[in-house]
Image: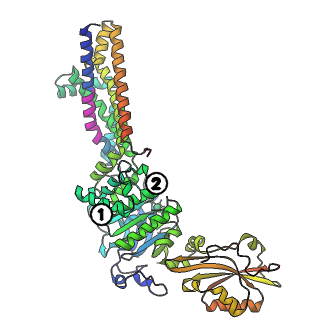
Amino acid sequence: MSPELIRIIIEATIDTLHMVLVAGGLGTLFGLPLGVFLATSKRDELFPAPALNTVLGVVVNITRSTPFIILVVAIVPFTRLIAGTSIGTAAAIVPLTVAATPFIARIVEGAIREVDQGLVEAARAMGATPLQIVRKVLVPEALPAIVLGLTLAAVSLLGFSAMVGAVGGGGLGDLGIRYGYQRFMPEVMAIVVAVLVILVQSVQTFGDALARRLNKRLRHA
Amino acid sequence: MTAAVALSSASLDGATKLASVPQDARREEAAITLAGVGKTYAARDGAAEVSALHDIHLAVPRGRILGVIGPSGAGKSTLIRLVNGLERPTRGRIALFGRDVTALDESGWRRERRRIGMIFQHFNLLSSRTAFDNIALPLEIAGVSRGEIETRVTKLLELVGLTDKRLRYPAELSGGQKQRVGIARALATEPAILLCDEATSALDPDTTRSILQLLKRINRELGVTILLITHEIPVIKEICDEVAVIEDGRIIEAGPVFDVLTRPAHATTARFVEGVTSVELPAHLRAALRSEPFPASLAVLRIGFAGPHAATPVISRLSTTLGLDINILAGRIDAIGEQPFGSLIVAAPGDIASLGATLAALHVLGLRVEQLGFIAAPPAMPARSPCEEVSDVA
Ligand SMILES: Nc1ncnc2c1ncn2[C@@H]1O[C@H](COP(=O)(O)OP(=O)(O)O)[C@@H](O)[C@H]1O
Ligand SMILES: [Mg+2]
């Protein structure tokens, strides 16, 4: 394998990591509060706003049920508005973030709904404000589940990021299609797949370990 | 709000004297007062509305321990949650230390709750925080400084005997230790009132006893007024000064624990009390029991003791003054606070003259007597005989 090819593979890997990290980071930034809100805004909950809860729920579901490749195309005008272009790594981050946000929001919502209501009750009995309950009780208690969910989101984003390669997004997917498929270099395709497998495996291992560290529920003294 | 308060401190007067009450405390405003309180949960999601509480009048005197006992679904949790505003009453008024809190808004209640601790059946500790950090939580919420938190939590850990578990997570603690953390957490903001919702129902009997002793110490040493709810009579017996019995959302009986437990006026109370205070005839004697006297039969009597009479050597006195052979078949003597109570089942000569004399003598002593029936005298009754079933006779 030529040094040139190795350089290209390394660059593509960096591009992929760049897209996944930025989209994952932004997705968490938007998805975490959205998820918390979805989990706490039904009737009689901490921030009751049932109408808004329903509307946001529908929006989240629509985004989540749209196939990613269609989402990419459908939001091109929005992508142009944000990134100034619809092609390349920077542009790919926009649809990736749009896909990651509702995904992460649902994960966070689920993790928070799993928190024992008795803890909310105890915090209320201490005189905690709803915001204090979120910050000091709900999020810390849900954290192990949230970390596992974010791991899942990162793995999905790796897959999606390979897909944006098909529409000019850059990264490993793009490399695999241009070299492996169009120029018929099966060894490049194989390397791309191998790198993706290693990335997924690493993310999963790291996420599992972190979640286990954070989970104080199953400790063996 | 002084109107119609079922458990006013005045009811402590009379036959029962609870030595630990300072005289002047009786005149002060109660710590918790509920007057004509009702609670109806609105209908929702297809479920009909639920009337959980009706016309509740209750006063918890300052510095005392009041227990509310009742079967599951009676409205106990609803009642206790009204006291710290986790639920709002649909009728009536609630006052804390004489201050009406019925109309407080949520932020007013938040401030109020810092003066009211609460502990729970399932402890409700944060699994992600150590014992120390769990106890620190209410202080963090109240905006207490780090240094102050360190000092106070250290003292609290000492108070509940968990200094060595400071950095343990709840998953590493036993049920009793978890409840101790819960108690320390509830006391962190130095509340005047402690609410206990079935705080020992998830614990084994030994642990229950040690937690109850801790609560009693907190009440006596820190002067914290305690309102606790339970479905277990032993909890009431062990630490409460007063008790209210609740059924179907109504308080059906209330008063000093000794009075209510030894002289239950309501059938439900009697059923609750039965297990701990009364005593049953051993099965083989129950089978031999007849309702009419017959030649040489012995009368079987259940004698209820309450208060000072339990201490008097009733049986030996009867035997000596009347010259009759009286045998104890079964018995149980217990105490609430320092006051003994209990019951004995005895066999006394069943002929009309002897029985009449026995009943009269017991009556003079002010004891409650119930005639259960008649049994045949054992062939040759040994001097101190069929006592195998006697338990706990002090
Ligand atoms: N949040 C609620 N919404 C509707 N009904 C409730 C609610 N909480 C309690 N109830 C009902 O009120 C009644 C009393 O419940 P509760 O106070 O929990 O009783 P206890 O603690 O004595 O078991 C029950 O019939 C229960 O189903
Ligand atoms: Mg209950």
| x and y, in percent, of residue A220 in the image | 44, 44
**Magenta-highlighted residues:** A20-33
- Disc 1: CA contacts within 10 A as few (<14), some (14-19) or many (>=20): many
How far apart, in angstroms, are the residues tagged by discs 2 and 1? 24 Å
| x and y, in percent, of residue A83 in the image | 18, 26
Q: Is mark 2 within 8 Å of ligand 2?
A: no
Q: Which residue is mark 2?
A: B174
Q: Which residue is mark 1?
A: B189
Q: Which mark is residue B266?
A: none
The residue closer to the viewer here, B171 or B95, is: B171
The residue closer to the viewer here, A27 or B391, is: B391
Quarter of the image for residue A66 reads top left
Relative to A74, is B323 above or below? below
Kind of residue sitting beneath label 1: Thr
Q: What is the chain letter for disc 1?
A: B
Kind of residue sitting beneath label 2: Ser
Relative to B15, is A6 above or below? above
